[in-house]
Image: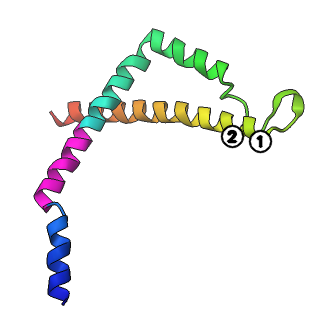
Amino acid sequence: MMDELNANNSAHLPSLGRQTRLNQQAQMLAVKERAALSELFSSSLGQRVLCMLELQFETHLPAFQGRLGQFDALDAMRRDAYREVFLRIRQQMELAKEEITNKTTIQ
């Protein structure tokens, strides 16, 4: 009975080699996406746009600070989500920088 279960389960699982190739492709795609983000937002215009957006969405303020000293849970949630987007962009830019540095030191 266990052999039947194992045979049925293994038929639905991708082969290890195929899964490895898919993982490598996903990693290569992520590297390309990070490089594109870095190229865009590292430019002077990209930096300017990023700063304008951060000011517009008030990501410099604490998430819990409401307008006029009042607390608004929905506003706090929104500001935290906005901040998360900018943190993600900056993180991806840093990773791209590291990948470029590692690539040039290896070659």
Residue 57 x, y percent position in the rendering:
65, 24
The answer to which quarter of the image holds residue 29 is top left
Structural distance between the alpha carbons of marks 1 and 2: 6 Å
In this orientation, which residue lies closer to the viewer: 97 or 20? 20
Tell me the residue that label 1 is attached to.
73
Q: Magenta stretch containing residue 22, yes or no?
A: yes
In this orientation, which residue lies closer to the viewer: 93 or 25? 25
Q: Relative to 54, is 96 on the left or the right?
A: left
The answer to which quarter of the image holds residue 69 is top right
Q: Relative to 70, is 48 on the left or the right?
A: left
Q: Residue at x 65, y 38 (%)?
A: 80
The colouring scheme, among rainbow, by chain, secondary structure or one colour, is: rainbow
Q: Main secondary structure of the magenta part?
A: helix
Q: Label 1 neighbourhood size at 10 Å, few (<14), some (14-19), many (20+)? A: few
Q: Relative to 58, is 92 on the left or the right?
A: left
Q: Label 2 neighbourhood size at 10 Å, few (<14), some (14-19), many (20+)? A: few
Residue 88 x, y percent position in the rendering:
48, 35
The outermost residue toward the right is 69
Element at badge 2?
helix
The image shows residue 89, relative to residue 22, as above or below, that is: above
Q: Residue at x 22, y 38 (%)?
A: 28
Is the residue under label 2 in contact with that under label 1 (CB below 8 Å)?
yes
Q: Residue at x 81, y 33 (%)?
A: 66
Tell me the residue that label 2 is attached to.
77
Magenta-drawn segment: 15-28
Q: Residue at x 56, y 37 (%)?
A: 84
The image shows residue 73, relative to residue 79, as above or below, that is: below
| Location of the C terminus (image quadrant) | top left
